[in-house]
Image (tube, helix red, strand yellow):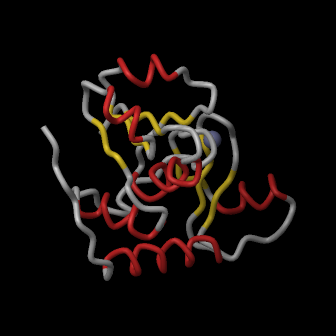
Amino acid sequence: MDCVYVDAMLGWLARMLRILFGISAVYKTELEDSELVTTECLVITRDRELFRRRRGPTILLATEDHVKWIAAFLRLGLKPFEKSACPLCGGQLLEVPCTEAEKAVGHRVLSHVCWRCSSCGRYYWVGSHWRRLLQLVQDAEKTVIQCRGIG
Ligand SMILES: [Zn+2]
């Protein structure tokens, strides 16, 4: 999944695809429908009309349940936490000494591992947010979903 477009209203999912699976998902609310219709990238949408008009690979999310969304990507064989991209911009995360992160953010960082986004420069570390991600993945792993292939 090198080339993934996430439809409007799915910003949360775009951030999760980046941080959990390292997918540099493109999320732009200003993406034109015509671009979403014709692109050969994978398009993820909740819009049945767009789904119907698509010719390339498409995932239609038929539920609002966010845990089920993640469950669907686990079922597609994506492995969580093997690599991460910056949740905000999709840039590559580079491991850096946590002393560098502490200096940049101006407070102590209680983590053994820290990253800097090579694109926007934001720092990340293992904190409470990370534990919520773990919980999300655990919940998704326990969730039974139905996937229907079309065409
Ligand atoms: Zn970034």
Question: Against 112, is 50 above or below?
Answer: above
How many circles with numbers are drawn on the protein? 0
In which quadrant is the N terminus drawn? Answer: top left
Give how far across and how far down residue 4 sits, in percent. Answer: 39, 35
Q: Residue at x 80, y 52 (%)?
A: 104
Give how far across and how far down residue 53 sits, in percent. Answer: 33, 26
Give how far across and how far down residue 58 sits, in percent. Answer: 30, 37
Q: Residue at x 48, y 49 (%)?
A: 18
Q: Is residue 26 left or right of residue 101?
A: left
Q: Residue at x 69, y 40 (%)?
A: 121
In which quadrant is the C terminus drawn? Answer: top left
Q: Nearer the viewer, residue 136 or 89?
A: 136
Q: Is residue 150 left or right of residue 101?
A: left
Question: Against 20, is 65 above or below?
Answer: below
Give how far across and how far down residue 98 sits, in percent. Answer: 66, 62
Outermost residue on the right side: it is: 106
Outermost residue on the left side: it is: 151
Q: Nearer the viewer, residue 33 or 101?
A: 33
Q: Quadrant location of ligand 1?
A: top right
Q: Is residue 54 left or right of residue 8?
A: left
Q: Residue at x 82, y 57 (%)?
A: 105
Q: Specify the quadrant of the image occupied by residue 118.
A: top right
Q: Nearer the viewer, residue 128 or 126?
A: 128
